[in-house]
Image: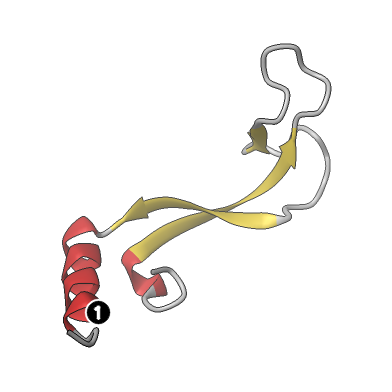
Amino acid sequence: MYLIRPDLFTKKPARVEVELQGTLTRGMSVADWSGRWGKPNNCEVLMAVDFDGFVEEFVRAIGRLPA
């Protein structure tokens, strides 16, 4: 949906990496929101969505499918 209607989303730049060594967090995505790692941001994380707008667009798209 973000590709079709990016205006429905709020995003925030961050540095995100996958934890590879943690015992409890191995394989988890970890975000550095405050820049403590000293590395540049490598993505934009979707933080919120206009739910009503999302549902409206979704229903509209489903309605265009062939019967």
Which residue occupies the extreme top position in the image?
Answer: 23
What residue type is disc 1 on?
Ala
Quarter of the picture containing the N terminus is: bottom left
Whether 64 is drawn above or below 3: the answer is below
**Total numbered circles:** 1
- Residue at screen point 68% across, 20% down: 25
- Residue at screen point 24% across, 70% down: 58
Quarter of the picture containing the C terminus is: bottom left
- The answer to which quarter of the image holds residue 20 is top right
Which of the two residues, 6 or 67, is positioned nearer the viewer here? Answer: 67
Which of the two residues, 56 or 62, is positioned nearer the viewer here? Answer: 62
- The answer to which quarter of the image holds residue 26 is top right
Q: Is residue 15 left or right of residue 55?
A: right
x, y percent for residue 28: 65, 30
- Residue at screen point 41% across, 72% down: 6
**Residue at which label 1 appears:** 61
Whether 35 is drawn above or below 6: the answer is above
- Indicate how the structure is coloured in the image: secondary structure
Whether 54 is drawn above or below 62: the answer is above
x, y percent for residue 4: 40, 79
SS of the residue under disc 1:
helix
x, y percent for residue 51: 22, 57
